[in-house]
Image: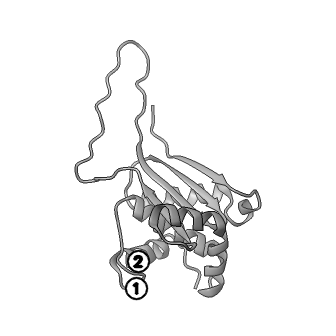
């Protein structure tokens, strides 16, 4: 049985689907993971309001403010992590084990504001946040939001390679 990407996408409000259509989001995630050479995996993605994002940011980062994206890595220690061996008997097809990357949460309100503030369209900003969140789930990090941060440079290179920058 072939492994396929599993993405669980949820929307706190159905109107968010207009900004981040499910089919487009899946396509973008697949393109980023393929560009990074990541095998099919599993992750979840939620689109929320600033109010909900502020609650999550306060709970998990002790910051009482909204943010554009939060990423929650499933694999705590990527260096020492190994998947269990699978065994099966009989004629049945073995179960397919997928690497679980974790969860991403994107604030639609902040995404829209950022797009306006940075003079980019909403689609480009959505793509940027997806790349950013996926890099975090894959173990990358940054100490600041300085454009010269290696992770942020890589983020922009991926966007350029995949045609996500429209300037």
Dots 2 and 1: beta carbons under 8 Å? yes
For the N terminus, the image quarter is top left
Between residue 45 and residue 32, name the one nearer to us. Answer: 45
Residue located at (40% from left, 85% from top): 146
Q: How many marks?
A: 2
The correct choice, above or below, for 84 with respect to 24 in the image is above
Instruction: Provide the residue designation for mark 1.
Output: 146
Which quadrant holds residue 87?
top left
Q: Indicate the secondary structure of the residue bearing disc 2.
A: helix
For the C terminus, the image quarter is bottom right
For marks 2 and 1, give the CA distance: 8 Å
Instruction: Provide the residue designation for mark 2.
Output: 152
Other residues around mark 1 within 10 Å, as few (<14) / some (14–19) / many (≥20): few
Q: Nearer the viewer, mark 2 or mark 1?
A: 1
Residue located at (32% from left, 28% from top): 86
The x, y position of residue 26, in whole percent, is 58, 55
The x, y position of residue 105, in whole percent, is 55, 60
Which quadrant holds residue 107?
bottom right
Q: In this view, does 157 lie to the left or right of 16?
A: left
Marks 2 and 1, the one that precedes in the sequence:
1
Residue located at (42% from left, 76% from top): 157
Q: Is residue 121 left or right of residue 162?
A: right
The x, y position of residue 159, in whole percent, is 49, 73
Q: Is residue 115 left or right of residue 92?
A: right
Between residue 47 and residue 35, name the one nearer to us. Answer: 47
Which quadrant holds residue 140?
bottom left
Q: Indicate the secondary structure of the residue bearing disc 1.
A: loop
Residue located at (41% from left, 59% from top): 137
């Amino acid at each position: 049985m072939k492994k396929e990407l599993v993405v669980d996408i949820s929307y706190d409000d159905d109107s968010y689907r207009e900004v981040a259509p499910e089919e487009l989001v899946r396509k973008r995630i697949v393109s980023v993971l393929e560009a990074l050479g990541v095998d099919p995996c599993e992750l979840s993605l939620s689109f929320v309001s600033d109010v909900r994002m502020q609650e999550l940011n306060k709970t998990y980062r002790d910051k009482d403010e909204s943010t554009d994206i939060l990423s929650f890595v499933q694999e705590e220690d990527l260096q020492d992590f190994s998947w269990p061996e699978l065994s099966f008997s009989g004629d049945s097809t073995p179960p397919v084990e997928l690497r679980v990357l974790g969860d991403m949460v994107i604030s639609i309100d902040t995404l829209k504001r950022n797009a306006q503030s940075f003079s980019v369209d909403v689609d480009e900003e959505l793509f940027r946040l997806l790349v950013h969140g996926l890099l975090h789930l894959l173990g990358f990090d940054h100490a600041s939001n300085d454009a010269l941060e290696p992770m942020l440079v890589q983020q922009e290179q991926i966007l350029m390679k995949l045609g996500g920058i429209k300037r």
